[in-house]
Amino acid sequence: MTQSRSLPSAAGRPMSPSRRLVRRLFRRRLVLVATLVLALIILASLLAPWISPFDPKRMDMVHRLQSITAVHWFGTNEYGQDVFSRILTGGRISLSVGLSVAALACVFGAIGGLLAGYVRRLDGPIMRLTDAMMAFPDILLAIALMAGLGSSLVNIIIALGIVYTPRVLRVARAATLVLREMQFVEAAKALGVSPWRIMVGHILPNLSSPIIVQGTFVFAYAILTEAALSFLGVGAPPSTPSWGNMIAMAQQYIGQADWLIFCPGLAIVLTVLSLQIVGDGLRDCLDPRLQKTS
Amino acid sequence: MMTYVVRRLLSMVVVMALVALVVFIVARVVPGDPAAVMLGSSATQSDVDALRRQLGLDQPLITQFAMFVRDILTGNLGTSIFLNQPVLDAIAGRAQLTLLLAGMSITISVLIGLPVGIISAVKRGTALDQGVIGGAMLAASLPSFWVGLTLIEYLAVKVHWFPVSGFGPPGASLWEHIYHLVLPSIALGLPNSAIIIRFTRSSMLDVLGDDYIRTARAKGLGLGAVVIKHALRNALIPILTVIGLTLAVLIGGTIVTETVFGLPGAGNLIVSAVLRRDYPVIQGALLIISGIYVCINLVIDLLYAVVDPRVRY
């Protein structure tokens, strides 16, 4: 998957680094399309209360279980609620869970990885604990934690944050191990900079690319796992129209209402797929091996 | 080699001890009194006290952990609160289905992943390759329960090619059971084939660029022979690792798939244990599954030495 791309010549500095990154990222049309799709999904979820064609909670028993029509774009469910409006509202839940989990995992993963990679004494204990955490399949550790914490949105975020922190931590540690041998760190050490300041001021900024890339993937996994947890009945409380919950409810109408299962699933797939494509594109642009520390 | 095996076993013991610690902590993050939660609101105080004593919850945490480890070492994983059956028996009684499902799923993942990954590496940069990369990414984005429900919808409800749910009557032949697991193992195996496709492709690309491949081709050997005999053998090590890891992921994935298809396996047991807050079962399942994962990792590492004589310890 590593499509190494040679850096444009560094002679002169025509563009700011961030603009150069954006240019390089969108040179691949697929990444551009995925970013637009993702932006559209996020925007639509954010604006859900204003742009939904119907109130997602309004029941309308006369028009229950209606297939896809011009009025109800994604049909209606067993209570006559508009599926499209519910998917928009559900997107707020799934996306905010995914984003919060990614943020939690990135913060704690960065701290843990930095400590493990830079402080020799801590490397063994932190990494063995990480190994132990990664010995559980994601979904199993998540449902076990949910069993203890009880089902609520905050608890899903905590549980998935715990599950996905080791993934970021490993990447952060590996990058720290490379960075700590670099000359600029040696120079800082020679100047008498304290280990603490070397970690925070010199290494941490250079960890941002691998962590952002990993964070994008965690965002995607968290959406998938949250949907699975909700589907199993240990995730979001049943009253919340999260995408996983919608599919779980639709299970009873299998064979008579395809759209009830298909449409929320499509929302999950589109979101996760776009996130993965963007993450892949970011990785190609920010590949640590291509990074020349200036 | 021997020292390596010993060292590897020792580190496995350390990881398992930490796994036990994690399981212990997970079971103790319950807000409030686990005994009261387990028995529900109708329990009397004396019932709760009795259960607390039975579970050792009245002891200090350190003692509790020591008891927990002692029990694990003696093979005693406790008794299910709800099933009134030793946890080990409850899980063992359902493991057959889960292992069969995991085995069939990994077979499907490998049957899709290996050839597709190899072809995509050989045809690097072509439209076919791009399509495979996109397809793998799409597969990795599919929620397995959604794939499962869609398969049920079209292949079991609309056309009756496969059973909608269940594992077949008890005492049915192995083939009958396998037939019931076809859709579940596709639902589980298809999304997970993505990882194998990606790794096979990148691992093959690494090897295909090597000089000895060019030499073999220059000698006049056919593409097929070179790819299979020369490249694949050397690309196999990372692929083996990822197959092992996928198997571990699949074992976790059976939890969801068994629920979708109403299969009475170990995954189903775990879900109902979570819904009923049957902590001994949850603990036992966590320990056993992570134990399997750690063992798979060990076997892969040791297989390295067998597959690749260059690996020295």
Image (cartoon, coloured by chain):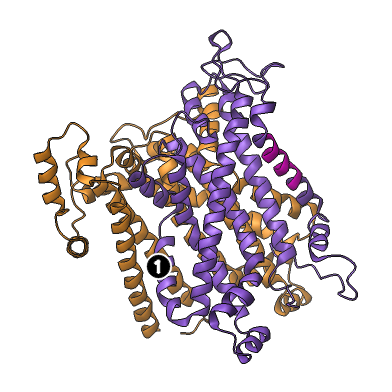
- Chain A as rendered: colour: purple
User: What residue range appears in magenta?
Assistant: A35-44
Q: Which chain is orange?
A: B
The image quarter containing residue A123 is bottom left
In-front residue for pair B283/B243? B283
- Taking the image as shown, residue B21 lies to the left or right of residue A74, namely left
Which residue bears the numbered disc 1?
Answer: A129
Residue A247: image location, x then y, percent? 52, 31
Q: Is residue B282 above or below residue A86?
A: below
Residue A59, above or below B274: above
Residue at (78% x, 57% y) in the render: A25
Report whether B142 appears left or right of A228.
right
Q: Is residue A41 magenta?
A: yes
Residue A277: x, y in percent? 69, 51
**Does the magenta portion include B230?**
no
Q: Residue, x 65% and y 54% (percent of image)?
A: B116
Does A154 sit left or right of A90 as displayed? left
